[in-house]
Amino acid sequence: MILYYALTTYHIQCCVLHRLTRKKDDNAILLLSDIHKNSVAFLERYKNSGIFDDVLLLEESEVNANVKQNEQKHRSKNLILKSACAEIKKVLPINPNSADELYLCPDHFPFGWYVIKNKIKYHCFEEGCGVLSDNKFMMSNMSRNKTQTALMNTLGYFGENDSCVKILADAQAQTEGFTHPKMTDFSVKRILEELDVQTLDKVLSFFGVKETIKANKNTSLILTQHMANLGIMPLCDQHKLYELFADYFLENTHIAIKPHPDDIAGRYKDIFGNDCTVLPFAMPSELLPYVFDGRVKTAIAAYSTAVKNLGNFCDRMICFDNRIMDDFRHIHRYYAAVKLAEYLDKSDSIVTNGNELLLKELAKNDGLQTEFRFSNEISDFNGCAIVSDKLCENRKIEDISAFVSSKQNKGWMIFLNEEQLHIYFDGTNKEVFSKIRPIFIEIKGTEKTYQEVIYLYSEDKKTLEKAENFSLTKELKYTGVTIDLHSISKSDSEKIKMLEGVLEATEKRLNGYIENKKAVDAKLEARGIVL
Amino acid sequence: MMSTIQNTKRKLKRKAKKFKLKAVMKNRFVLEGFYKYGDTDKSRFRRMLYLTSLHLSSKFGSISRAKPRVYERKKYTIKPCVTAPESSFAKRPSPTLMAKKFLVNDIISFDIFDTLILRPFDDPKSLFFLLGEKNKCPGFKRYRELAEKLARQEAFEKNGTYEVTLRDIYEKLSRFVLLDIDKAMQYEIETELDLCFANPYMKEIFLQAKNLGKTIIAVSDMYLSKDVIEKMLRKCGYEGFDNIIVSNEYNASKRSLLLYEYIKEQYGIEKKYIHIGDNIVSDNRSARKCDIEPVWYKGVNPRGNAHRAFDMTSLIGSAYRGIVNAKLQNGDNQYSQYYEFGYTYAGFLVLGYCKFINDYCKNHGIDKILFLSRDGYILKSVYDELYPNSDTEYVYWSRSAATKLTVNRFKNELLLRYIKYKIPRKMTIAKILKAMDLEEMQPFLDEAELTEDTLLTKENYEDIVKVFTAHWDVVTEHYKRSNDAAKAYYKAAIGNSKSAVIVDIGWAASGFSALRYLIEDEWKLDCKVRGLVAGSTYLHDMDIIEPQMTNDIITSYMFSQRINREIRRDHDVKRMYGAFTEIMLSAPAPSFIGFDFDDDGRIKYEFDYPEVEGYGMINEIQDGIHDFVNDYTKHFAKYPCMMNICGSDAYAVCRQVISCSEYFSNLFADYPVNRAVGSASFETGSLGKLIENEFVK
């Protein structure tokens, strides 16, 4: 008998495909963990599919909850492990020793601990496609689970222990040159491609797909992540992220959404309206090419690993990295920067210390192939540059503004000013303002209007004059706002006059501090102390 | 077994609490002794001993036996959240967690009132006050409550259940007052519909259930009909219920379990159910008994009222508490403590004051409102939102500017503020002259052997005054340019107005008095000005603005010699009540110093060193103020009478927080305080230090 243990939807998919292609003649039982609520909700459907001889539910969530309770009581990791294994033994609906072969995915949850601790031989599937060689994101997710992280070295997760015989992983999806002695090739993508129609239908219906969706040249696809579920951001922010994606990248297209299997709370019909297509969340994204009848125009994801499996299914694939989870909040600034850069000069290469992927994709919307080169070195910003406030994370503002003031070429710099740090101004180099033009981003909502500002710096007067005439309006359908980009207007001049007074006072205060510091430094120096 | 032990524990705890309450409320001596002087850090046992000793002293000592009132106890027990934002204590399961729970259940059941739907009152019965007005029936609230009680008793005698309909209640009402029943019922339904609003947290939870395609039902133990409740739900944006089950239509309640049994019968016993509601008995324990997974959503009002001001008028007080509780306790969002300070305390004062200003303007034929900097910044911003067609102006003004601009009249003010009050600061003559911007006085002072380095002392103060008096023409000439600039500025600000009001926070209205003199006498602008202050009291001279108040030139909103004198006595300036109130209305801008002309002949504004450290806090406070005003006015859009917030109500809310110095020393410890305004010192102190100094004194 073959015993499969699976936790996430990807894991269940691996078990299903392994069973259908590699172990079709054996007696097979699927053991599902109730930590994953989808398994509880769709247990009956899984049973009725007939793919496995039996589908059992392991009540592992209570064990997991007790682990967390023990963590709070500051019990030692060994004690927690011992009690978790004892509890697992009590709730096991089937003895893993009775199986001829045991396939585990994953092995870093209490059932996995039990198997490793009791030295039961098993094979494991990799955590996600290509994750065996690149597990940074997964590790950062796992780091929030204290005990799990603490036990990692003791037990050797992800097959890195003596009990694990084989690690089934997609060899082609691994990073270049990666090898592992236990790795056995198991590519979900290729297995799906090779499946006959009948078996494929079986798989699709196992995951609740009842019919195929007609895709045309105008269909776009959003692959969501479960950030709110992971506690990375609140649900409303997650919704906002996808609204902005749709507004900036999927304009005038029919939107289809494939929620991540754990993105149970995402309310996409409410956001994108009833016209959009929302696919079953409990379906693995690898099945997408078989759900759509045709190619989609654009597929977009925040930082999904599943994208790697989509291959030639879409004309344009947009996928960022995990920086997008912060940078999406400043997407209007990025958009304004790209548009301003286009307006000023269709430069082939722009250096940035911001999110170069976001800039690249925004530029691609207009068919531009501008290269956005990432650099954190100030000296690289001597041509055309888009500068993020992140630059001052490990540098003094004085150094940055000194570089800005010393710039002698005919290029320009756009300061995104996300954190309102005004990194071009160190409090003394007032002449910089004569070479700066603010670009206002008026964000007009139904209830409130608010404003963001980016700043253009240039030594070239013509560039500055050109920027003064820059204006653009964009309606964001799903976010429900209109963005109005413009340079300074005459009506603001009075306000500026007032602000000049405020600024003057601020400068005085700053100077006061500087003078004070100088006096203290001098005193210290007189005593022979140099800081 | 476990639940029996838990129940017994709970009962014992409740009894102990009741016993303690009774013991504390024995008489005023015990109450004050226990809360005011009792050390809350002591162990429970030692506190009990202390309470016993208080009882013994009260028994054998010659102590008044006067019984304290409940509000006297609440003065001690109800406190603002000091250590963390109040909203952070409202721990509710996240929408993602609830979605997971819903996924494994078949039927999702919601309680309606205080769960899906909230009302802008901390006690739903407060709504009967408004009905009393509609029915023109004083005492309606009491009658309505008694009628409901009678109707329920009768229903129990007849049917064995307490379930009644609205008509049953109104029929019983005829025992107390003769009203047109249909009309009165319609009023109640109408008012309920007007005032109900969706609980934002529950709305998200509801949408989660809907998104998952679950069967959703709403269940309520209520006397209103299903139709009315359906309308209320629809108004609040809840649509898509499979059924709305109301107790009075089935003669069965959730509390008695019968309603749950009925639901299970209807939808199938094999199905998995989850019920979300606020009542610990009917929504939690009863549901559990019927094998329905309960999710207890403790009501926003029981949670929030532990921190709310209570000594207020019944209707407005209930509305204030209801709105704040709904915002901070619903679980939808967590706010910063500064935002909550603005929302909970400052917003109510600002709203009440703005309405007061508007009424004043209407009654006195005022055509222009001048809000003085900096306290007027937020007042103007809110006022403009509330009354967009009013002619308002935010004008730069400060004590410092006033002192310099009125040297032609108020000579002593300049000498006091810039010289005498600086004696304890041990400043040199040079520094003082710099602060006054009057360096040209130095040669005259030199003649009197008061050199640049001479320290200002009590002894040489009169000598300095003599020099200044002898050369007062130099002083007036020096400030003339500034005076001209101020005149031009105010002429433009007043425009064609013939009757303007100047709004300030308080306390001695010196800013107003100076400006009134300049506008009416010195500049001779054709405009009569009046003044409004939020409160009037002055540490050095209590009667300072008495004549102007008697003359109806200055009016105070919250308290003065003329109104709410007991509040004025309570407003302890020495305990920094005034300073704490000013924080509520602070602006993210530096203090104004004076006017001048620039090289192009345009008016130039001079500011003091900005206390930038506090701007972040102030912006958050102001966001909270705006949101409170928006929420309050939105909820009571159809009930303009609810905007009439009397000064004593506004003060009750302020008092709750300004009397709690721990709140300020915790939240505003780093808040910058420039005590040396106009003394050319860029260094600011912090409120934390100031509190420490003042309270040690």
Image (cartoon, rainbow, N blue to C red):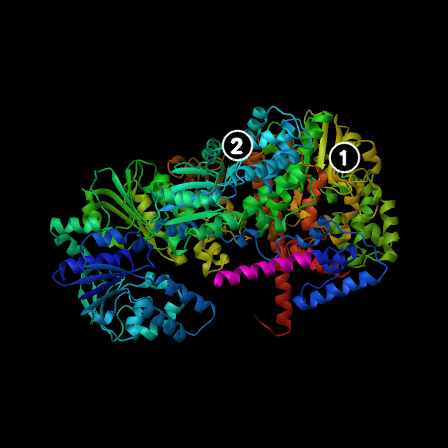
Left or right, A202 with reference to B547: left
The secondary structure that dominates the magenta segment is helix
Residue sitting at x 58%, y 49%: B302
Please say if the residues under marks 1 and 2 sit with CB atoms less than 8 Å apart: no
In depth, the one of B158 and A162 nearer the eye is B158
In depth, the one of B675 and A32 nearer the eye is A32
- How far across and how far down the image is residue B95, in percent? 42, 49
The answer for which chain carries disc 1 is B
**How far apart, in angstroms, are the residues tagged by discs 1 and 2?**
38 Å
Residue where numbered disc 1 is placed = B555
In which quarter of the view is residue B648 placed?
top right
- How far across and how far down the image is residue A516, in percent? 64, 61
Q: Amino acid at mark 2?
A: Leu
1 and 2 marks on the same chain: yes
Q: Secondary structure at mark 1?
A: strand
- How far across and how far down the image is residue B632, in percent? 58, 37
Quadrant location of the N terminus of chain A? bottom left
Q: Secondary structure at mark 2?
A: helix
| Residue A286 part of the magenta segment | no
Residue B632 can be seen, yes or no: yes
Q: Local crowd at mark 2 within 10 Å, few (<14), some, or many (≥20)?
A: some
What residue occupies the far front of the structure in this picture? Answer: B158
Of circles 1 and 2, the one toward us is 2
Left or right, B311 with reference to B626: right
Q: In the image, which residues are magenta?
A: B1-21
